[in-house]
Image (cartoon, rainbow, N blue to C red):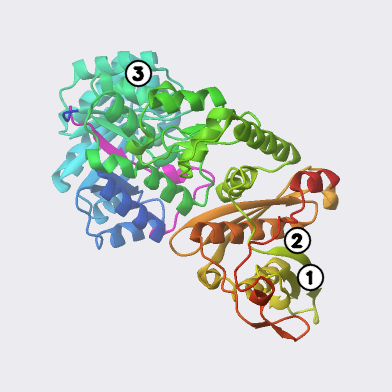
Amino acid sequence: MAAGKKIQIYDTTLRDGCQSEDVSLTVDDKLQIAERLDDLGIDYIEGGWPGSNERDAAFFKEVKRLKLRHARIAAFGSTRRAGIKAAVDRNLHLILQAGTPVACVVGKTWDLHVREALRISLAQNLEILNDTIAYLKKQVDEVVFDAEHFFDGYALNPDYAIACIKAVADAGVDLICLCDTNGGRLPHEIEASMRAASAAVKCPLGIHCHNDSEVAVANTIAGVRSGAVQAQGTINGFGERCGNANLVSIIANLQLKLGYDCVPADKLKTLQETSMLVYELANIAPHPRQAYVGRSAFAHKAGLHVSGIQRNVHTYEHIDPALVGNDRRVVLSELSGRANILYKTREFGFDKELSKEQIAALLDELKRLESQGYTFDGADASFELLMLRTIGLAHDHFNFVSFRVFDDKWHEDQAPFSEAVVVIEGPDGQRTRNSAIGNGPVNALDSALRRALVPYYPNLENMQLVDYKVRVLDNGIGTGARVRVLIESTDGSRQWGTVGLSSNVVEASWQALVDSIEFKLHKDNVKPRVTARVTANGARSNGLAKTGGKYAPPKPPRRVNRAAAAAKD
Ligand SMILES: [Zn+2]
């Protein structure tokens, strides 16, 4: 698509977004976000209100050290106070002190606010607007005026609202951004008011919406379609009350659906990581159902949908998720049908077509496990193993014999530690007993099991656990509740997730741990190293002797049927 009309993107995450009751960003966070926004191709970054707090003042100092390639930094403030000249207004001074190329000031355009909040005459407010802009225009390269409550003002007293924006236009403002500050207006109202404002003033207009009616993005689009050349908003829609218009969705909609030019086409795919970075720095869990960039935005669970997207992705996707840096995901659950299973087998690189019977067996097993509380979402490796075992393509690389875990705490003010003893039967049929100390039972079990297996499988040496999550199911049963453990492992080149379930957290962890190791061994497809070794009773033996010098595959696994085990819990 050829680049369409340019729409400036003005980000106010660092100012309006920080009005969110649960958002607090440090100066370092703000600098990181500014760099990310610049890389994305955002035109303006509003850094804060230098008159309101020291943190914002510090940001303006530090941001000058960043080598921003595209974005212009804006300092925010309000029009001068009544009864004084702009030149002596302290807040305007602080804006100028910030030393930014752009100044943005907010002022009143709704007569109700002039009378009730400022308690001055309507004429006095017009004077304030004109004087403030004329003064700033002499000192700063670019001046933006935020017409606070413009749409409410226009609905109730259109003549006065228009007189206000004329006053700032006459003073030489560079752009007037019309604001739906209370977030109460609907798209058709935005369109009508925007057209009226366009007809009344020659200077460019922008649009700044809040989300109190959950149409902030729609209102912004309506504003752009009726003449605005600048869209203001925040990443992920952070902001006071219900938030601001979400710039992530605005950019994607304007660029992908309407053909406007907002950010460079190749930068659009960084929208998802930009959204995640802002969530992370704000320490807020990402919204999974967020349009375009949420984890569920392109997740398909119903079997019908999955069979649809396999034929043609357009059947259940409004855009290609890769365009905004997101991924398509197929979720497995009891709602899953044959299509989900087939999609996964392909994703896991199975060239061999599964028979109808194998798919039915796999689906049955999956539904049985999920009814027990297993979830394979986030545990693809466990699912792959389940699939391989069900169709007979995977064997276990060792047999479980027993484990014991002890927890010790010796002094009140010292952390406890755990010791685990693990007995396994290796691929050579030899039983070994290994123990290890850890900072917790799972850590100790992991070390002891690894100690037992590394002599056979040295490739386990470079594998480690990177994440461990416990979730309590059956809320209300208290300490008897079942827990689901998700483990994330890596070997440096790949990362995989496994799951375990039990009413005993150590057992659930053990299951996830064993799957994690089995998955690694299956993927690496290495033959075990079987040499003379010391067995548990200290006698030196060679497993090969028993099998005539050849490695014999282990006996059929003595794996406990997980569904049956869970059912007993
Ligand atoms: Zn706002």
Q: Position of residue 502 (x, y in %)?
A: 77, 51
Q: CA distance from mark 3 to mark 2?
A: 58 Å
- Residue in the image at 41% along x and 54% along y: 53
- Asked whether 498 or 530 is in front, the reply is 530
Q: Secondary structure at mark 1?
A: strand
Check if mark 1's residue and mark 2's residue have beta carbons within 8 Å: yes
Left or right position of 104 against 328: left
Q: Is residue 187 above or below residue 428?
A: above
Question: Ligand 1: does it lie within 8 Å of the C-beta at label 1?
Answer: no
Check if mark 3's residue and mark 2's residue have beta carbons within 8 Å: no
Most extreme residue toward the front is 548
User: What segment carries the magenta color?
Assistant: 4-27
- What secondary structure do most residues of the magenta stretch adopt? loop
Where ligand 1 lies, by quadrant?
Answer: top left
Circle nearer the N terminus (1, 3): 3
Q: Which residue is mark 2?
A: 506
Residue 85, can we see it? no
Question: Ligand 1: does it lie within 8 Å of the C-beta at label 3?
Answer: no
Q: Secondary structure at mark 3?
A: helix
Q: Which residue is mark 1?
A: 405
Q: Position of residue 492 (x, y in %)?
A: 45, 64
- Residue in the image at 32% along x and 51% along y: 36
- Asked whether 480 or 360 is in front, the reply is 360
Residue 319 occupies quadrant:
top left
